[in-house]
Image (cartoon, grey):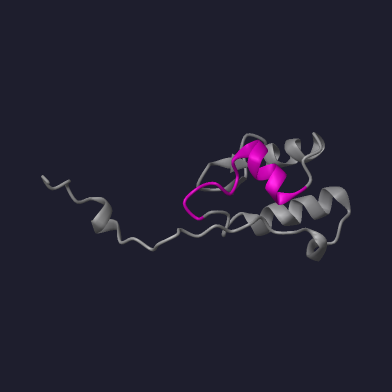
Amino acid sequence: MSKNTKKIICRCEEITEEEIRKAIREGYTTIKAIKRRTRAGMGLCQGRTCSTLIRDIIAEMTGNKKEDILPDTVRPPLYPVELDVLGQKKKDV
């Protein structure tokens, strides 16, 4: 990999590995804190793709065990809504 290539950790928000590492160096050492600092995990997948990668980087940089690093709180939608419902035009009342 060339020096100019940036490894994307969070594809939804386009957050790079260096941005995650910088946040950890600044003292953000939990998945929740990194999410708040960088927006990693706030995209469409809600961290399902990147949280494991972020956990691995935290463990590497802090020396903590991966299993000791808590995941972020998952908040599913209150009601599942089909996308075609969201796209419907408002009817006159």
Give the x, y percent position of residue 57: 75, 51
Residue in view at x 81 percent, y 55 percent: 59
Q: Quadrant of residue 73?
A: bottom right
| Left or right: residue 78 compared with residue 26 | left
Q: Is residue 89 visible?
A: yes
Pick out the residue farthest to the right.
Answer: 63
Q: Quadrant of residue 72?
A: bottom right
- The answer to whether residue 26 is above or below residue 45 is above
Give the x, y percent position of residue 44: 47, 51
| Left or right: residue 50 compared with residue 71 | left
Q: How many marks?
A: 0
Q: Front-most of 9 and 68?
A: 68
Q: Is residue 36 magenta?
A: yes
Give the x, y percent position of residue 41: 58, 49
- The answer to whether residue 29 is above or below residue 25 is below
User: In the image, which residues are magenta?
Assistant: 30-45
Residue in view at x 82 percent, y 62 percent: 68
Q: Front-most of 40 and 87?
A: 87
- The answer to whether residue 41 is above or below residue 16 is below
Q: Is residue 1 visible?
A: no
Pick out the residue farthest to the bottom.
Answer: 67
Residue in view at x 61 percent, y 54 percent: 50
Q: Is residue 21 magenta?
A: no
Give the x, y percent position of residue 61: 83, 48
